Image: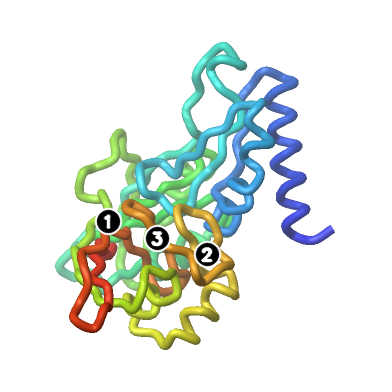
Amino acid sequence: MNSGEVINKRFEELAERAYSENRYVFTDFLDMSGLSAFYDVERNLAYAGTSVSGGTEGCERCMVRFGSPESCGYEEEFPIELLHIRPLMKKFSDTLTHRDFLGTIIGLGLERTKIGDIVVRDNEAYVFVSDTVSDYIIRNLTRVKHTSVRVDKCDDVPEEIAPKTVEESIIVSSNRLDAIIAKVYNLSRDAAVRYISEGKVFINSREMTGNAKSLKEGDVVSVRGMGKFIFGSEGGTTRKDKLYISIRRYI
């Protein structure tokens, strides 16, 4: 049984458990490959009721919930909590990156599947985590690199961690996935095709394997290791019949 068959079987087991026991069942945080695998079989599992959340809109790492208010008779929130990690003395803090915060949290002995998205703003981090590990992190995470930090739970998702984008206009030969990725990330066309064939490109959390796909307004394109952007619209052609396209790049 290959890895795809294993994860699909797991989804089927969780859906059946939720349906037969009339209760909610949750996965851990899934990465984009895991979410793509779920979306491939989502229709087959609809009988149990399904929904997806990473803690707020736009998260890349998300949990899947099996069960619904109609089938279970009640509502249950996703078991996700938001932690705020900040230096005790900011002016003496190291420069802290996503990798620094993630490495420190994993270094506590936690599995990556218990940790969702990490948003870094001005040397502080907001981390979505499974509620089974939040108290453990608060008790044990006291330092990131050489910087002493404090960890608190957030009651609400603050506005400052909302995704930030910058609008750009690019010129491409056509509305094809490979052409657009090559232009956005300054890659050769062959490199863009290779990213796609290696399963590193996702549109709306679904893995893409075809490089000729056309994008439509609102599509969110993620390229592993490179970043992500939102496709805007086509805006006419140049004198050489190339295409103007608008995007919003995440920063």
Q: Which mark is residue 107?
A: 2
Residue 110: tell me if it is visible. no
Horizontal arrangement in the rendering, residue 135 relative to residue 160 (left or right) = right
Q: Residue at x 27, y 65 (%)?
A: 249
Q: Residues within 10 Å of mark 3 (few under 14, many from 20)?
A: some
Percent from the top left, x then y, of residue 132?
A: 54, 40
Look at label 1 and name its amino acid. Arg
Work out which residue is located at the far left of the displayed protein and give it.
91
The Cα atoms of the two marked residues, 2 and 1, are separated by 18 Å
Tag 2 and tag 1, C-beta contact below 8 Å:
no
Residue on which disc 1 sits:
86
Q: Quadrant of the C terminus?
A: bottom left
The Cα atoms of the two marked residues, 3 and 2, are separated by 39 Å
Q: Residues within 10 Å of mark 2 (few under 14, many from 20)?
A: few
Look at label 3 and name its amino acid. Leu
Indicate the quadrant where residue 91 lies: bottom left
Q: Nearer the viewer, mark 1 or mark 3?
A: 3
The Cα atoms of the two marked residues, 1 and 3, are separated by 39 Å
Q: Is residue 88 above or below residue 22?
A: below
Q: Which SS class for mark 2?
A: loop
Q: Which mark is residue 215?
A: 3
Look at label 2 and name its amino acid. Gly
Q: Nearer the viewer, residue 145 or 228?
A: 228
Q: Quadrant of the N terminus?
A: bottom right
Between discs 1 and 3, the one toward the N terminus? 1
Q: Is residue 226 above or below residue 27?
A: below
Q: Which mark is residue 109?
A: none
Tag 1 and tag 3, C-beta contact below 8 Å:
no
Between discs 3 and 2, the one toward the N terminus? 2
Horizontal arrangement in the rendering, residue 84 relative to residue 93 (left or right) = right
Q: Is residue 78 above or below residue 105?
A: above
